[in-house]
Amino acid sequence: MESERRSMLSLSGFLFPHLWTSAHWFLLFVCLWTLVSGSSYKQGDPVILYVNKVGPYHNPQETYHYYKLPVCRPKEVRHKSLSLGEVLDGDRMAESLYDIRFQENVDKKSLCELKLTEAEVEELKEAIEELYYFEFVLDEIPIWGFVGYMEESGFLPHSHKVGLWTHLDFNIEYNNNHIIFANVSVRDMKPVSLDDVPGGTLSVTHTYAVHWFQSPLTVERRGERLRDFSFFPKTLEIHWLSIINSLVLVVLLLGFVVIILMRVLKNDFARYNIEEEAADDLDQADNGWKIIHTDVFRFPLCKSLLCSVIGVGSQFLTLATGIIVMALLGMFNVHRHGAINSAAILLYALTCCVAGYVSSNFYKKIGGERWVWNIVLTTLLFSAPFFLTWSVVNTVHWLSGSTQALPVSTVLLLLAVWVLVGFPLTVIGGIFGKNSAGTFDAPCRTRNIARQIPSQPWYKHSIVHMTIGGFLPFSAISVELYYIFATVWGREQYTLYGILLVVFAILLSVGACISIALTYFQLSGEDYRWWWRSIFSTGSTGAFIFLYSVFYYFRRSNMSGVVQSVEFFGYSLLTAYVFSLMLGTVSFFSSLKFIRYIYINLKMD
């Protein structure tokens, strides 16, 4: 409860900075410095080692409190005060019995003696067979290790051995008065066998050793030491190959749109811009996109929903850009748990004004009158699916006893952020958008009676356009998508944010280019229903991303179980939905800009 209380106080200070005193600003400075440099110690000072969580190695989001296992624990468990991001990340740090002092080596010291019952032995065996790993935290540095050892060998006869690690060697690197890095090893140690326990009980003695090593790295560069073990820097060449592949695709698409399409348009302009005296016979003598100039700006059905889609899509475009830029500026320290989670929640709440403004502004331009309903729809377009998904996932975690289940106080805190910040900013943005909206200013007049649309060949149907418009942007990010999935659904730290920014820009560029091309082909077939088609054509990339997530789950990961599966597919579906909103928004505005351009350059009566 203390951690949630502090999270609430820290958030209230952020939301109401005019209430801050000089002590608040001093505390903020100390906290920011701690994120980068960690704590400062003198020789012999105690260094607190926090135990955090355990869980199956192949199910990173299925985690449980470390003290759920029959391990050494203090008589009174004292938890560390956690930030909002740490709670969302499933952290539940608690003090341990390990006595570690700065720069003081310990060869072998007893931690505790345990007498395990038959049920506790079976619990440990089951955990080891499921490849349970543990996570400790020392001076904001995560330390990982396996709970035990399992060996499968032979077919006839079959051998199955399960052992518990009862001794841990802590190797800690330091520079001057700061800790740089820490890890744990069980090298040269034998596990205690859990097979065929006599009498059903087992007595074990847990021990540990501590070794300190001088490090040449300064405290400002201690993040590099942790990244040395990351999967991503070792595959930088593959990243650049994926970037080159995506850039080639962008160049080809830009060449298609700028050269081929513009040459076609040039011929169209030369053919359509006929003398004024021949314009009376235009409808009978010509066809193509010029002939539907009186229908192309006919407003679509479900105007409020369309405006809400582009409003929320604009919000997530702003949110994604902000997260990547903050990461490039080094605001997410690799030693700080849940920093991106906290930033994403606050940015989402603050960017709600973008969704309200864009949606309400465009809704007023196209003649919408129920702007209050438009704001409500904009608010619920993402929050309602998110709440539904989260409710299912959180319920499953709660039933299984996982640390990923959010406490009631944290749920109330998040609800307060949405009610007190997100929703009001959506309303405020909607009011500003409605009041600042001008006229739609279409370059062509719209007839009262809609023109009949001729039958279209199969390659101009919506499903074909959605397949093409979704696959090409997906192919531009497919390689990078693997590394992102391996980070989100694994234990790696993603640090190549510059490459991520380039890939994000490529994704948006490809989506815009393919949208313009598909819109031109649609209009050339005298089909003026481009409004929703432009959103779905490139927004279908989300469907390809979800299909890739299914492929990743079954072919690229070893995840299993109800808890992990529900979380993976629930949030993967939500992620695909967000990508559909973002790319649909980019596609719509690109098509609108293109249509305005081609019709404003026509000579009309």
Image (spheres, rainbow, N blue to C red):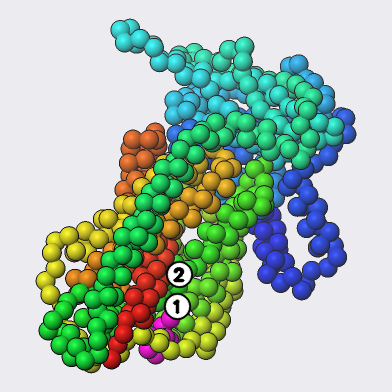
Verify whether residue 368 appears in magenta. Answer: yes
Q: Which residues are magenta?
A: 362-369
Residue 360, placed above or below residue 67: below
User: Which numbered circle lies on residue 92?
Assistant: none
Q: Nearer the viewer, residue 406 or 294?
A: 294
Residue 542 visible in the displayed image? no
The percent position of residue 149, horizontal first and vertical second, equals 51, 20
Rendering coords of residue 34 (x, y %): 77, 47
Q: Where is residue 542, by image quadrant?
A: bottom left
In the image: residue 470, left or right of residue 433: left
Q: Residue at x 85, y 62 (%)?
A: 23
Mark 1 to mark 2 CA distance (whole Å): 8 Å
Pick the quarter of the image with the N terminus.
bottom right
List the residue tagged with mark 1: 359
Query: In the image, 291: left or right of 209?
Result: left
In the rendered structure, which amino acid carries the disc numbered 2? Val
Residue at image point 62% right, 11% down: 188
Q: Which residue is mark 2?
A: 312
**Magenta includes 104?**
no
Helix, strand or loop for disc 1? helix
> Residue at image x 52%, y 89%?
435
